[in-house]
Image (cartoon, helix red, strand yellow):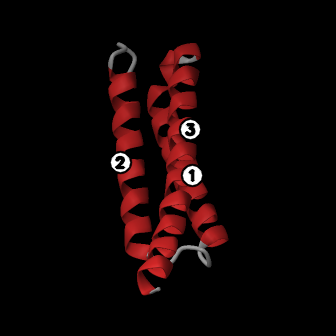
Amino acid sequence: FWFICNTRKMTNTLIYSFLAFIFIFSITVSVVRLYKSFPKMGIALVWGSLFVKMLFVISYTIAVREYIENHIIYATFIFIAVIHSMAHTLISLKKDKYF
């Protein structure tokens, strides 16, 4: 019985982490698309997207904190998501001469 309850708690944590990752990555994709319209605003878009991502992560974590059982896995997943999205943003914007 302990294993079933523990697995259910882990599943909730992974689902909430994955939902956060999807939203963070959607912000990244929208920033890259927005950059194509305004190429001279590369640095502002990078810092602005980081601000929006952190604001989302803080708000989302406060909203779902009661449902997250394993905080270490959640924090690790969010950290990986933010690092991955920032690296993806920088690599995508680095290809242009204005950045």
- Disc with the residue nearer the chain's start (3 vs 1): 1
Quick one: SS at disc 2? helix
Q: Which mark is residue 27?
A: 3
Residue drawn at x 51%, y 33% is 45
Front in this rendered view, residue 35 or 63:
63
Kind of residue at disc 2: Ile
* SS at badge 1: helix
Name which residue lies at 41% across and 80% down: 3
The residue carrying mark 2 is: 83
Q: Amino acid at mark 1?
A: Leu
Q: Position of residue 5 (x, y in %)?
A: 50, 80
Viewer-nearest residue: 5 or 99: 5
Residues packed near mark 2 inside 10 Å, few (<14), some (14 to 19) or many (20 plus): few
Which residue is label 1 attached to? 19
Q: Earlier in the sequence, mark 1 or mark 2?
A: 1
- Give the amino acid at mark 3: Ile
Horizontal side of 34 relative to 93 (left or right) equals: right
Q: Residues within 10 Å of mark 3 (few under 14, many from 20)?
A: some
Number of residue marks: 3
Measured as percent of width and height from the top left, residue 81 is found at 41, 49
Question: How far apart are the two marked residues, 3 and 1, measured between alpha carbons?
Answer: 13 Å
